Image (cartoon, rainbow, N blue to C red):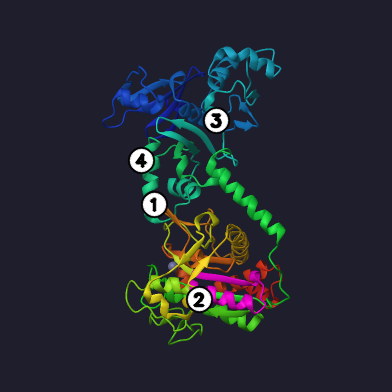
Amino acid sequence: MEGAELLWLSSDLRVRVRAGREIELEALARAGETLADVSRRVCGRAEPLGLAPEGWVPVPMALVSDEMRALVLLHLFPEDRRDGEDWLHVARSGPLPTYGAGLWQVSAWFTGSGENFPRLMETNGLRFPELSPGQVIRIPGSLLHAAFRRPRSDDGSLEFASDERGPYAGYRLRAGEALYSAVVVRFTGRDSPEDVTRLAQELSTRSGIRDVTDIPVGYLIRIPLDLLEPEFLPKDHPRRREAESLRAEMARELARQPVASTRGGLKGVVVVLDPGHGGRDLGTMSNGIWEHDYVYDVTCRLKQRLERESAATVVLTLEDAHTGSVPSTGDALRANQQGTIQTTPPFLAREDGEAEIGVNLRWYLANSVYRRAVSNGGTPDRVVFLSLHADSRHAALRGAMVYVPGARYRKDSYSQTGKVYRRYQEVREQPEARFSHRDRVRSEAVSRKLADAILRAFRDRALPVQAHRPVRDRVVRGRRAWVPAVIRANAIPAKVLVELVNLSNPLDAKLLGAAGERERLADALFASLFHHFNEPVPASVEARRAAR
Ligand SMILES: [Zn+2]
């Protein structure tokens, strides 16, 4: 019978209920841990605890920390729930028998004092403190213990509190969730393997976790506020307010001047396609697939679609000097390293380290195309720039991710003054790119519209999309953040950098490695341009989607 009264939370934490009403948390002293260490771990401070047989330390509910109190009660009463400010407790509903508990115990557990029980009787209109199984007891927010009364994020998933190391947001892990994907990737915006691993370690240490494979469900993971993406911060946090005022400004901008529509079939639209990397630079490589040639093939397929099935004009920033822009015939591709930037004169990166020159020439070229399109009577909104890539994020992540030019992360002007650049007509035409505040706000707004259109087209075709925050306004690595150069100094308002897949993920790599799937990626990008300009997608595209 003794065994049946134990509820295991992890290999070193378990809950016991004595006499059907006395809850005790039992903590196993880990190797090298003193009783004072155990006390700090489960009580948050040094309490006089005693050692029980086999290293288990019993801790009465009155002594446990707020976080442990919530953890224990959430496990003991899984049907309990929040209701606005109040808490609803379902009496005698949990996995351990609590036959001896009445309103006094419920009051002690959830308000911190048994003496509040008459007020619970009053709130719930009860005449006796005895409880029956399944009876729902409302605990008013004003009486609720601090452990259940913390301010929460908008979606309710995070609770805000503070410890000796500063303010943090707490997330309670659910069954089956892993620290790196459910917490690090979701809330911090980090996705490179190094960052995810390092942050998972940092959060574990901060949260008192010794073994990341043995975290109790419901355990509170502490995330320092400076690591959170703005939308998860408390409402009054300066970074959140800044992000919201920018969002509002973008919405006003689009309301004042909506994205210009087209006259059917993308007529009058100029699409600048920028296949990432090329020449010496093959881009990232993983699972037998390297970035450049495979992404270039998607670009060529998209170009062909646009030229055959729309009225749009296509400009490539880079073209293979050997194969031209003809799509491949098979799955496997060769790396012939002849990708040449289409500037005047053309530029081919032959040496390691020349890739950066290529990146800058791409935006100079894009800006030159844009100037020409607009001076020929074109509408700024009808020029779009798509830079196509594939990256290597944490291997557990899948799918497309789109970078937009975050207005907050761009400067007023950009220029390259090196002698090497003066050879190129596009640089001499206009050596400096200048942006007003409104330019940057409008650009992020219209680029987000384009990014949403792309993700919609991917989802329509069941092509994978990154689960958390697939649209991002900057790249984050470690403590550094930046907008990729091809969309940072680029004057075309609607511009995105698309990571088509994550090559570190074997399924994603396999997808990009197959010619038929590259065709589907091109089709999705093709359809997305129609979505962006609020045009119906041509019947031919819809037919291909339905044929799958
Ligand atoms: Zn790339």
- Whether ligand 1 has any atom under 8 Å from the Cβ at mark 3 is answered as no
**Residue depth check, mark 2 versus mark 3: number of the one nearer the observer:** 2
Cα–Cα span, label 2 and label 4 = 52 Å
Name the residue that disc number 1 marks. Answer: 478
Callout 3: SS: loop
Q: What's drawn in magenta, residue-wise? A: 363-388
Q: Which comes sooner in the sequence, label 2 or label 3?
A: 3
Q: Is residue 219 visible?
A: no
Front in this rendered view, residue 160 or 259: 259
Type of the residue with mark 1: Gly
Instruction: Identify the disc placed on residue 365.
Output: 2
Mark-to-mark CA distance, 4 and 1: 23 Å
Separation (CA) of disc 1 from disc 2 = 31 Å
Which mark's residue is nearer the viewer, 3 or 1? 1
**Residue holding disc 4:** 211
- Residue type pointed to by label 2: Leu
Mark 4 packing: few (<14 Cα in 10 Å), some, or many (20+)? few
Circles 3 and 1: CB atoms closer than 8 Å: no
Q: 19 above or below 169?
A: above
